[in-house]
Image (cartoon, rainbow, N blue to C red):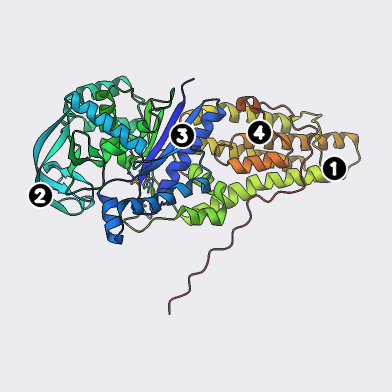
Amino acid sequence: MKSFYITTAIDYVNGSPHLGHAYEKVLTDVIARYRRMMGDKVHFLTGVDEHGQKVQASARKEGIAPQAYTDRVSQLFRDLLPKLNISNDDFIRTTEERHKKVVRQVLQQLFDKGEIYKAEYQGFYSTRQEQFLQEKDRLPDGSWPEIFGEVTEITESNYFFKLRGYQEWLVEFLTQNPNFIFPAYRQKQVLEFLKEPLNDLCISRPRERLEWGIPLPFDEQYVTYVWFDALINYYSAVADLPGVWPATWHVIGKDILVPPHAVYWPIMLKAAGLALPQGIIAHGWWLTAGAKMSKSTGNALNPLDLVSEFGTDAFRYFLIREMNVGQDSDFTREQFLVRYNSELANNLGNLVNRTLNMTTRFAAGVVPAAEVTEEPEAQLHALWTKTRDEFIPLCEGFQFHTALERAMQFITATNAYIETRAPWKLGKSAEPKDQALLRTVLATIAEALRLGVALIQHVVPTTTEKINGVLGYTPGPVWRDELNWGGRLTGAKVAGALVLFPRPAPPEKTPAKA
Ligand code: MSP
């Protein structure tokens, strides 16, 4: 069986990971876990991008060797993964031998095929973006946009990859594969970009200017340009694993879609005779007060602070519930607290508590069997069927935020069902009819809870495990078979209590300035 192979971008290691990096890992993990639930054999890769000007410069600033620098910072990215409960199968560093070897092989192969040539280049260069600029990159007033940082004019010989020769092929490919890029409106932007003629891609940097890179196999006086090096990680990590390549999805941020992932990468693969991925998912940005969160602007949030305050699952839940994949979202603590309190603590947490408390109080902790189906039960069953049937298509379309919303609406409806049936009143009655109804209510809410959490397990895996644990339930191996209403908990012994989402401490007051 061909693997469902999914990757994240590999992060630059010139600073510590922030919320934007964490989001990409969590989103990719949610897709990976969902595919495993659907029965796929998943291979999930993430990693770090360790070469290039930025790392070289950061290491110099500290007066240490780039390898020592990147060893330390890469570890921060690696350590983040278990804290976010990321289920990756592999972690690649571009300084690893397995990667360097494949990059050199691909370069040599393209050189031998005549896809790479040497030429003199004269023009403007942005050190910050590690990119040569063109006249069309200037602002109307002739200056260079801020994002390029310092721009200098240089003349040097370099190696170029023949991108232009593949332009028509790429346009044709994207036209034939309208779902190559998600969301679809981004694919239109790529086609728009391809209306202008492509320039061949400069893929080398002279070693005297950039020491920290992979030497070209056919000219050791040069190292590879970062994108050529970085993109190949997706292939180098699995080159020796049968049944994994090509990738199913590359998950990246919208800032690195055009041109690196949507133009360079498909052309590199085509030229190297390698199969193309099924597609690319380009997510949006987390913003603070409308601006992209990034280490250079100093507005980045440390994901570990939120995880230590609220727990991994609440953090994962918020990211996935809040962000519509592809669009941007503003991160605010207030909004985090609203979702934490109203959806996790007061809705899901409350249903768990009521289920455990009432089963303990009215049925000695053993889930009874349902005996009656009247209007309120029938309504909840019907809502379940609708929720379940809509859930899979939503996940298939990466609408995880809506899928979660629906799952939570079902939990809300279950809480409302409890209010309608008022089991605390039934518990006071000795009438056999009321007792049968009480048993039905307990059975219904336990089953609804079991089903509801089955829909959120890819987002909040630890919470799901804990809830199944206190319900005395071990899910079967086939997730889809778990989704039928069936009184599976009848006879299960439940635990007395479970604290899932404790009330967070009120935010610290900043002392008033004197
Ligand atoms: N090293 C390159 C990627 C090479 S992939 C072959 C790079 N690194 S990065 O560290 O700058 O960004 C890594 C990923 O984090 C990118 O997909 C980027 O879009 C994402 N994010 C960085 N800041 C972000 C936000 N504020 N919000 C969401 N994701 C963003 O680019």
Residue position marked by numbered label 3 in the rendering: 44
- Inspect this view and state whether residue 299 appears: yes
Residues 369 and 463: in front is: 463
Residue position marked by numbered label 1 in the rendering: 364
Whichever of callouts 2 and 1 sits on the residue coming sooner in the sequence is 2
Whichever of callouts 3 and 2 sits on the residue coming sooner in the sequence is 3
Work out whether 4 lies above or below 423.
above
Residue 280 % position (x, y) = 36, 31
Asked if the residue under mark 1 is in contact with the one under mark 2, i.e. CB atoms within 8 Å, the reply is no
Q: Amino acid at mark 3?
A: Phe
Residue position marked by numbered label 4 in the rendering: 451
Residue plotted at (16% across, 49% down): 208
Whichever of callouts 2 and 4 sits on the residue coming sooner in the sequence is 2
Residue plotted at (49% across, 42% down): 320
Q: Amino acid at mark 1?
A: Ala
Question: Disc 2 versus disc 4: distance between alpha carbons?
Answer: 63 Å
Badge 3, how many Cα within 10 Å: few under 14, some, many 20+?
many
User: Position of 384 compared to 173: left or right?
Assistant: right
Per the image, label 3 sits on a secondary structure element best described as strand
- Which one is in front in this view, the residue at disc 2 or the one at disc 1? 2
User: Position of 5 compared to 403: left or right?
Assistant: left
Name the image quarter holding residue 231. Answer: top left
